[in-house]
């Protein structure tokens, strides 16, 4: 009996020992594998450095860069054209630029959505209109000398058209019909000579509605000046314009070189701004699409 009791006690102790030995091993393996290896790696991982998040951020940036193009398209189609631009057929060219920007906007955003499938083809497709817009922008700001006969509204193209007598006769009549000089008279009717000299005039008003300062005429009102005796500074190129001045509201200085220059400056200022916008927009979109392309290639390579 004593032997049987001792055997039962030994068996119970063995049974009790087995789970005690196995349980710590299981807990250690579970705790060591989860806490020691995976958890710290998850905590140290920066989600902003993942290629998927970077790709989404670049795509969003590209879409944001295309929004000003959409706003500029609205401006092109709804803003009032400058006076007398239609004589040089510039409004039609402005519409053509607007249509080109619409295609650029659609192509740019289409490439963003399809970048994961065809990144190389998408980059090539979007580069063609971007390059075209960039070249037109350079021409409008006068960045190179060969744009005079190839791109409308470039500085040299405008100069050739404005100083062509056939065009100038129509432009001169248009400036008169718009009443630019009549508006100047109504705004400065109560001003004295000194106050008028401080008045800031537009390029057309100073060139077409008033005589050149070198003529040294006496001010009566904005479009009526009395000539002095003698010819001031005979070597000045504006002396001939002193003789062209006429107080008749239909003549004034519409035939003067200064009037042509004033109208030319008005056109060049507008189209220069448009050219700067085209250059900046094309460069920003080019960089955005190039970075997005590289991100898509890296993403495909890692996958």
Image (cartoon, grey):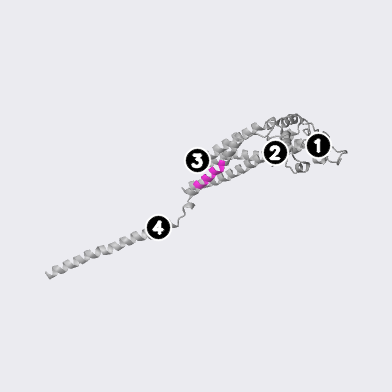
Q: Please report whichever mark, 4 or 2, sits nearer to the chain's N-terminal start.
A: 4
Taking depth in this image into account, of 10 and 224 the one nearest to the observer is: 224
Helix, strand or loop for disc 3 = helix
Please identify, in this view, whether the residue under mark 2 or under mark 1 is nearer the observer: 1
Q: Nearer the viewer, mark 1 or mark 4?
A: 1
**Which of marks 3 and 2 precedes in the sequence?**
3
Contact between marks 3 and 1 (CB within 8 A): the answer is no
Instruction: State the mark number for residue 113.
Output: 3
Q: Is residue 11 left or right of residue 113?
A: left
Cα–Cα gap, marks 1 and 4: 89 Å
User: Residue 142: which quarter of the image?
Assistant: top right
The secondary structure that dominates the magenta segment is helix
Within 10 Å of disc 4 (Cα), the crowding (few <14, some 14-19, many 20+) is: few
Circle 3 or circle 1, nearest the eye: 1
On the question of residue 140 being in view, the answer is no
Q: Is residue 215 above or below residue 20?
A: above
Residue 140 percent location from the top left of the image: 67, 39
x, y percent for residue 119 = 52, 42
- Residues in magenta? 55-67
Q: Position of residue 178 (x, y in %)?
A: 70, 31
Q: Residue at label 2?
A: 268
Q: Earlier in the sequence, mark 3 or mark 1?
A: 3
- Residue under label 1, please give it: 225
Disc 4 is placed on an element classified as helix
Report which residue position mark 4 lands on: 39
Q: Is residue 131 left or right of residue 54?
A: right
Of all residues, the one furthest to the right in this rendering is 230
Q: Count residues near mark 2 (Cα–Cα under 10 Å), then give few for <14, some for 14-19, many for 20+.
A: many
Q: Mark 2, mark 3: which one is toward the viewer?
A: 2
| Mark 1 element type | strand
Q: Tell me how far mark 4 sits from mark 2, CA to CA.
A: 65 Å
Gap between marks 3 and 4, in whole Å? 35 Å
């Amino acid at each position: 009996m004593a032997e049987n009791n001792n055997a039962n006690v030994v068996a119970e102790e063995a049974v009790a020992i087995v789970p005690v030995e196995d349980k710590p091993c299981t807990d250690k393996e579970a705790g060591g594998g989860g806490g020691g290896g995976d958890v710290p790696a998850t905590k140290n991982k920066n989600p902003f450095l993942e290629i998927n998040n970077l790709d989404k951020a670049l795509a969003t940036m590209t879409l944001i860069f295309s929004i000003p193009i959409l706003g500029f398209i609205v401006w092109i189609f709804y803003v009032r054209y400058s006076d007398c631009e239609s004589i040089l057929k510039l409004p039609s060219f402005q519409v053509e630029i607007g249509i080109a920007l619409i295609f650029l906007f659609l192509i740019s955003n289409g490439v963003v959505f399809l970048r994961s499938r065809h990144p190389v083809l998408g980059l090539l497709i979007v580069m063609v209109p971007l390059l075209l817009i960039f070249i037109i922008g350079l021409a409008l700001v006068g960045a190179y000398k060969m744009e005079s006969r190839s791109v409308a509204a470039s500085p040299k193209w405008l100069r050739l058209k404005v100083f062509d007598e056939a065009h100038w006769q129509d432009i001169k009549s248009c400036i008169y019909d718009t009443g630019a000089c009549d508006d100047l008279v109504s705004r400065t009717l109560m001003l004295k000579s000194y106050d008028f000299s401080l008045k800031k005039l537009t390029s057309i008003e100073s060139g077409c509605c008033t005589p050149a300062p070198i003529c040294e005429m006496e001010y009566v009102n904005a479009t009526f000046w009395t000539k002095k005796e003698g010819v001031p500074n005979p070597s000045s190129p504006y002396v001939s314009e002193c003789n062209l001045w006429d107080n008749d509201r239909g003549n004034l200085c519409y035939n003067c070189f200064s009037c042509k220059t004033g109208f030319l400056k008005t056109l060049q200022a507008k189209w220069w701004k448009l050219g700067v916008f085209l250059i900046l927009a094309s460069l920003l979109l080019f960089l955005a699409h190039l970075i997005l392309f590289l991100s898509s290639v890296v993403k495909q390579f890692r996958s």
